[in-house]
């Protein structure tokens, strides 16, 4: 291969890799942004930044009041202290498990499914598991339907 051909191949590969790049933000970083940003005063207006259209439509189709929907979207408030987290990403979806304790020092886990939509990760399904002890914490990322206690 001649040097000019090699240079063309390298430049072409660089262009292709830039256009095919998906946001490399971790699921935990997106969860942390939600945990830091969302509160009782802004959750309904901020929710499209953190939750999928499907999940929001499901919440809004229920007979719940706006205050009840806001309470559901603020599930983060159940966990007072985080212990660890695990995540796995495959193509356009991923799962995040966050283990920790509530305000009464009882162990619990958030198991979240994320989907990748328009350059950001959005929560698409939520499972909150109250477990017996820290020994019951998952040691790997689990999607909501996969968690076995």
Image (cartoon, helix red, strand yellow):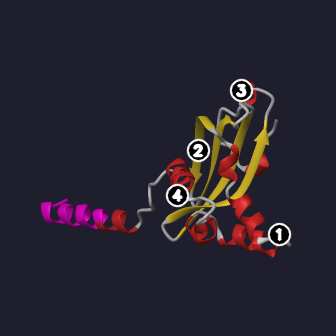
Residue 69 % position (x, y): 75, 66
Instruction: Tell me which numbered mark, 2 or 4, is placed earlier along the sequence.
Output: 4
Which of the 4 image quarters holds residue 70?
A: bottom right
Residue at the disc numbered 2: 87
The earlier-in-sequence mark between 1 and 2 is 1
Label 3 near label 2: C-beta < 8 Å? no
Residue under label 1: 64
Q: Disc 1 versus disc 2: distance between alpha carbons?
A: 31 Å
Magenta region: which residues?
1-14
Q: CA distance from mark 2 to mark 3?
A: 18 Å
Q: Does residue 115 appear left or right of residue 66 in this picture?
A: left
**Rendered residue at 29%/63% (across/down):** 14
Q: Residues within 10 Å of mark 2 (few under 14, many from 20)?
A: some
Crowding around mark 3 (Cα neighbors within 10 Å: few <14, some 14 to 19, many 20+) is some
Residue 37: numbered disc: 4
Residue at the image point whose x is 67% and y is 48% from the top: 77
- Look at the numbered disc 4 and give the secondary structure of its residue: helix
Q: Is residue 102 left or right of residue 10?
A: right
**For residue 104, what is the image quadrant?**
top right
């Amino acid at each position: 291969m001649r040097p000019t051909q090699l240079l063309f191949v390298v430049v072409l590969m660089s262009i292709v890799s830039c256009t095919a790049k998906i946001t490399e933000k971790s699921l935990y970083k997106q969860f942390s942004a939600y945990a830091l940003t969302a509160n009782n005063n802004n959750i309904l207006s901020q929710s499209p930044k953190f939750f999928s259209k499907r999940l929001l439509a499901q919440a809004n189709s229920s007979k719940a009041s706006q205050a009840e929907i806001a309470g559901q979207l603020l599930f983060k408030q159940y966990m007072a202290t985080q212990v660890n987290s695990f995540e796995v990403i495959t193509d356009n979806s991923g799962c995040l498990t966050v283990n920790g304790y509530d305000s009464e020092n009882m162990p619990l886990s958030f198991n979240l499914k994320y989907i990748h939509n328009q350059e950001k990760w959005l929560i698409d399904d939520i499972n909150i598991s109250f477990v017996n002890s820290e020994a019951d914490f998952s040691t790997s990322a689990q999607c909501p339907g996969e968690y076995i206690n």
